[in-house]
């Protein structure tokens, strides 16, 4: 474990596993604990550099407002501080996927491959903006606990939240323990002020896998298919689940990711939708 000083504040980082480096960045509202079920499988083939974003987990709030480009530069600062040489396989969930798109587009020498999970590329729609603004207001007025249950429903889907209380506890705990000022700062910077990053996809040259949950209402399979088509070497994949975080609690997600990293075909056995496309690429040593 380590803390690394970056332009977006002091970030908490953990390193584990063996093999080529992979950087993991989580979704807004939660932290790196949401990778826990996937990490053992991923760490068998990669050295994982797992980051808590600013204001989340054990990371400090950022000293000033920041952008997704700032987060991508902060990731480079983390890798430099850890003396990680060579490009990384980027794995990002929602917010982490947004940062990954900017990282791959603006720092192509540092990105070996890009995998995004449940990452909407466009800016928030008006209805979603109102919902997120309300969450931010309630967080400021009442604190995180009254909001945590609603977020677990939204991020996991009600069915998974009921069927998997451990997953729900991970989501609620991550939201509650986050730095309060840092959380509201992140909601503003990463959600309410999030730009449309569609044009960034045209600049991504790394092999890219864009995945989403079968029933994710804010990042649909048709969305990821369209966005992946804009990437020179882009593929899309449909995973089980509804909310942005649901795929992280399904072991098939780790199998899909490691298969993509190895250059194997990601087949329909790892998906539950006929909209999915097999994702393949040549392995890189």
Image: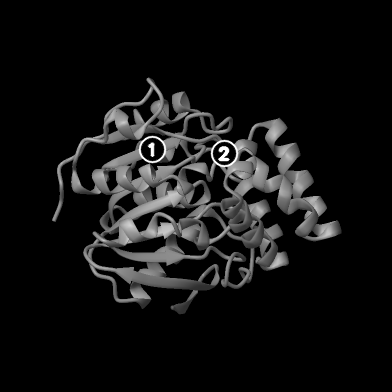
Residue sitting nearer the eye, 262 or 281: 262
Q: Which mark is residue 210?
A: 1
- Furthest toward the front, the residue is 163
Give the Cα separation between the discs numbered 2 and 1: 15 Å
Q: Position of residue 155 (x, y in %)?
A: 60, 44
Q: Position of residue 96 (x, y in %)?
A: 47, 52
* Residue on which disc 2 sits: 243
Q: Depth check: 226 or 169 in front? A: 169
Residue at (71, 43) in percent of width and height: 132
Task: Tell me the element at label 2.
Answer: loop
- Of the two numbered discs 2 and 1 in the rendering, the one whose residue sits closer to the viewer: 2
Q: Residues within 10 Å of mark 1 (few under 14, many from 20)?
A: many
Give the image location of residue 236, x and y in percent. Answer: 35, 32
The quadrant in which residue 285 appears is bottom left
Q: Residue at x 30, y 28 (%)?
A: 268
What residue do we see at 52% from left, 37% from top? 120
The disc label shown at residue 258, or none: none
């Amino acid at each position: 474990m380590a803390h690394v000083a970056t332009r977006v504040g002091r970030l908490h980082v953990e390193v584990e596993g063996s093999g080529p480096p992979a950087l993991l960045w989580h979704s807004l509202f939660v932290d790196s604990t949401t990778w826990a079920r996937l990490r053992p499988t991923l760490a068998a083939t990669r050295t994982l550099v797992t980051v808590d974003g600013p204001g989340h987990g054990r990371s400090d709030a950022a000293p000033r407002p920041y952008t997704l480009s700032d987060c991508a530069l902060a990731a480079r600062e983390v890798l430099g501080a850890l003396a990680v040489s060579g490009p990384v396989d980027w794995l990002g969930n929602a917010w982490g996927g947004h940062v990954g798109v900017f990282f791959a587009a603006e720092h192509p020498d540092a990105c070996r491959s890009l995998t995004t999970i449940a990452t909407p590329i466009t800016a928030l729609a008006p209805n979603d903006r109102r919902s997120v603004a309300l969450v931010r207001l309630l967080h400021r007025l009442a604190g995180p606990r009254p909001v945590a249950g609603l977020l677990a429903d939204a991020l996991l889907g009600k069915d998974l939240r009921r069927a998997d209380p451990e997953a729900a506890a991970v989501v609620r705990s991550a939201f509650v323990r986050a730095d309060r000022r840092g959380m509201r700062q992140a909601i503003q910077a990463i959600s309410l002020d999030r730009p449309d990053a569609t044009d960034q996809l045209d600049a991504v040259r790394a092999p890219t896998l864009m995945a989403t949950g079968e029933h994710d209402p804010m990042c649909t399979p048709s969305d990821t298919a369209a966005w992946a088509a804009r990437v020179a070497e882009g593929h899309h994949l449909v995973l089980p689940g509804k909310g942005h975080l649901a795929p992280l609690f399904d072991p098939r997600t780790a199998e899909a990711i490691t298969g993509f990293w190895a250059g194997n075909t990601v087949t329909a056995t790892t998906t539950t939708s006929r909209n999915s496309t097999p994702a393949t690429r040549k392995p890189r040593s």
